[in-house]
């Protein structure tokens, strides 16, 4: 966010009180590109600068992959939600089918089937893992990309969701967004059936609302996830992830993957003690 | 406060609001905006034959083609220059720090064209990638993108017109809007003493897709699909 300050360091809003109406009119007339984003004209000057790289903070998870998620309030599922069978994409072989028993020294843990997919190299950015997310704001669209192929397109041009019956569920779903003050609010449907952090579930009809809130320092970001689906949840399932902005000059890596490489399937190889 | 002073402040507020809105929307006020969805039509390619060095023999080219086929077979990330021609639209988004190019494909890494630096990441620290390290600047109405740091063995390395990318490849792209912004011309110029006898240039002209375009979910590339594997290996 940018505050408007006079040369002497005083906020110019105060002396302009008497002319506030004129200012609003002027901003309205001069900010046409931003109004396409469904923000109110007065909010155009507070569009947050979210563009850049963001790294997930794992302040309470002891660095484990799911440590942060373990402190989320558990999802309150309906009987249907509890009965829903969650199927993976077939790539991950743990915990269903993978051998997670303690291994001997030199015996690698095989954790996936080796297939190179966007899911396996950072995923969609919903419930992100330890690789960075990169945001880019443009007039009609906000992109959220990772360090592999694919990315989320968040439409900012005022369109609605297509008819779900005509939309194939996919790992990115269909997202539309708008700004609310210093937050980007994103509404997503059409995600495939699957698991949600904190013991949740999702299906194509499940509505995910994400609120990207920039901290006043501009260097921290929180994303609040709200999963809502009366068929699956007793009440909306809400949790939050925190991020830290990558330093200026940072750049995206490329997460290389080769399905033909046996090493692609394995994780830790316990060393000799 | 006098009317004159109010006027000055109003102008400042107006300019700031415009600037902030443009910034957050990923635009600068002085450069064209190439953001949008762009499709490469059948008649959008002008690709002369490359003049290769004598060291690039038929055997070298065959080995390279075999490696490319293997990369496709195993769903490897294809990288440049294939990212710019995958048969599906490109989503190009322009910000103030960078421009991002996202292709509708499960095997094309995202391209980041950095506007906020003028030199490449040192090769001492940069891990070569299939997309390389791209820095970009505006030269009038033309976006000039300079890329080095290519990985020579990963992905699909073939270059349209002949040749392939190596660790010593240097690519310069020039992006320019044509026909009132409905067309995007991209001229690619590759130089590489290991491959080209002279700089190799070709041009793609993309058509802007209509507003409201929806990117289509793509089918996952499955390296363990036996029927697909047989089909691809039969074609070698």
Image (cartoon, rainbow, N blue to C red):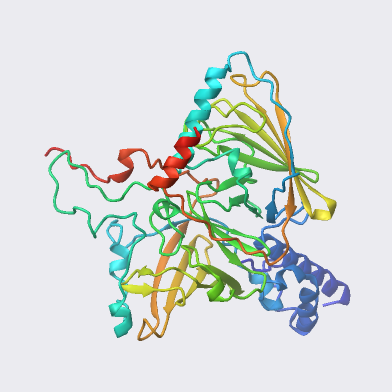
Q: Quadrant of residue A67?
A: bottom left
Which residue, as the protein is rendered here, is positioned at the far right? B4
In this rendering, is residue A134 above or below B69?
below
Residue sitting nearer the eye, B102 or A114:
A114
Residue sitting nearer the eye, A146 or A182:
A146
In the rendered structure, the answer to whether residue B25 lies left or right of residue A62 reads right
Estimate the x, y position of residue A11 in percent, counting from the top left. Answer: 67, 72
Estimate the x, y position of residue A268 in percent, counting from the top left. Answer: 24, 45
Q: Quadrant of residue A154?
A: bottom right
Residue sitting nearer the eye, B95 or A246:
B95
In this rendering, is residue A177 above or below B157?
below
In the rendered structure, the answer to whether residue A131 lies left or right of residue B165 reads left
Total marks drawn?
0
Q: Quadrant of the N terminus of chain B?
A: bottom right
Is residue B128 at least partly visible in the picture?
A: no
In the rendered structure, the answer to whether residue B61 lies left or right of residue B162 reads left
In this rendering, is residue B194 above or below B78?
above
In the rendered structure, the answer to whether residue B74 lies left or right of residue B193 reads left
The residue drawn where x is 59% and y is 74% is: A162
Which residue, as the protein is rendered here, is positioned at the far top? B54
The residue drawn where x is 50% and y is 60% is: A219
Estimate the x, y position of residue A46 in percent, counting from the top left. Answer: 64, 71
């Amino acid at each position: 966010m940018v505050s408007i300050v006079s040369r002497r360091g005083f906020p110019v809003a105060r002396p302009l009180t008497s002319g506030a109406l004129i200012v609003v009119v002027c901003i309205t007339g001069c900010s046409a590109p931003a109004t396409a984003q469904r923000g109110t004209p007065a909010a155009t000057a507070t569009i947050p600068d979210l563009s850049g790289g963001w790294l997930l903070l794992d302040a309470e998870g002891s660095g484990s992959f799911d440590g942060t998620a373990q402190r989320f309030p558990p999802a309150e599922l309906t009987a249907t939600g509890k009965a829903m069978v969650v199927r993976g994409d077939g790539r991950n072989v743990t915990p269903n089918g993978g051998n997670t028993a303690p291994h001997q020294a030199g015996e690698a843990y095989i954790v996936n089937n080796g297939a190179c997919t966007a899911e396996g190299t950072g995923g969609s950015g919903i419930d992100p893992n330890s690789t960075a997310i990169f945001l880019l704001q443009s007039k009609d669209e906000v992109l959220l990309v990772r360090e592999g192929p694919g990315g989320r397109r968040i439409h900012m041009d005022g369109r609605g969701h297509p008819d779900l019956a005509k939309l194939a569920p996919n790992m990115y779903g269909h997202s539309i967004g708008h700004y609310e003050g210093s937050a980007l609010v994103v509404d997503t449907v059409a995600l495939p059936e699957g698991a949600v952090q904190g013991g949740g579930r999702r299906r194509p009809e499940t509505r995910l609302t994400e609120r990207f809130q920039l901290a006043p320092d501009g260097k921290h970001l929180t994303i609040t996830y709200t999963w809502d689906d009366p068929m699956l949840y007793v009440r909306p399932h809400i949790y939050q992830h925190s991020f830290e902005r990558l330093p200026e000059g940072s750049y995206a890596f490329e997460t290389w993957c080769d399905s033909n490489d046996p090493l692609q399937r394995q994780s830790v190889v316990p060393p000799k003690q | 406060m006098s009317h004159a002073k109010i006027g000055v402040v109003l102008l400042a507020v107006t300019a700031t609001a415009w600037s902030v809105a443009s910034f957050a929307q990923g635009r600068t006020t002085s450069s064209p905006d190439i953001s949008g969805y762009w499709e490469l039509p059948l008649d959008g390619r002008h690709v002369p034959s490359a003049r290769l060095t004598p060291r690039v023999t038929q055997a070298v080219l065959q080995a390279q083609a075999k490696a490319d086929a293997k990369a496709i077979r195993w769903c490897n990330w294809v990288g440049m220059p294939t990212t710019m021609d995958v048969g599906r639209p490109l989503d190009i988004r322009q910000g103030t720090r960078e421009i991002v190019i996202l292709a509708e494909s499960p095997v094309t890494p995202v391209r980041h064209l950095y506007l906020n630096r003028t030199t490449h990441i040192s090769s001492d620290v940069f891990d070569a990638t299939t997309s390389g390290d791209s820095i970009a600047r505006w030269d009038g109405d033309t976006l000039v993108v300079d890329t080095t740091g290519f990985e020579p063995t990963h992905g699909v390395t073939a270059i349209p017109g002949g040749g392939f990318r190596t660790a010593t490849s240097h690519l310069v792209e020039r992006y320019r809007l044509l026909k009132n912004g409905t067309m995007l011309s991209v001229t690619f110029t590759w130089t590489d003493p290991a491959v080209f006898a002279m700089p190799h240039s070709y041009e793609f002209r993309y058509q802007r897709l209509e507003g409201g375009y929806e990117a289509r979910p793509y089918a996952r590339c499955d390296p363990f699909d036996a029927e697909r594997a047989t089909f691809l290996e039969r074609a070698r």
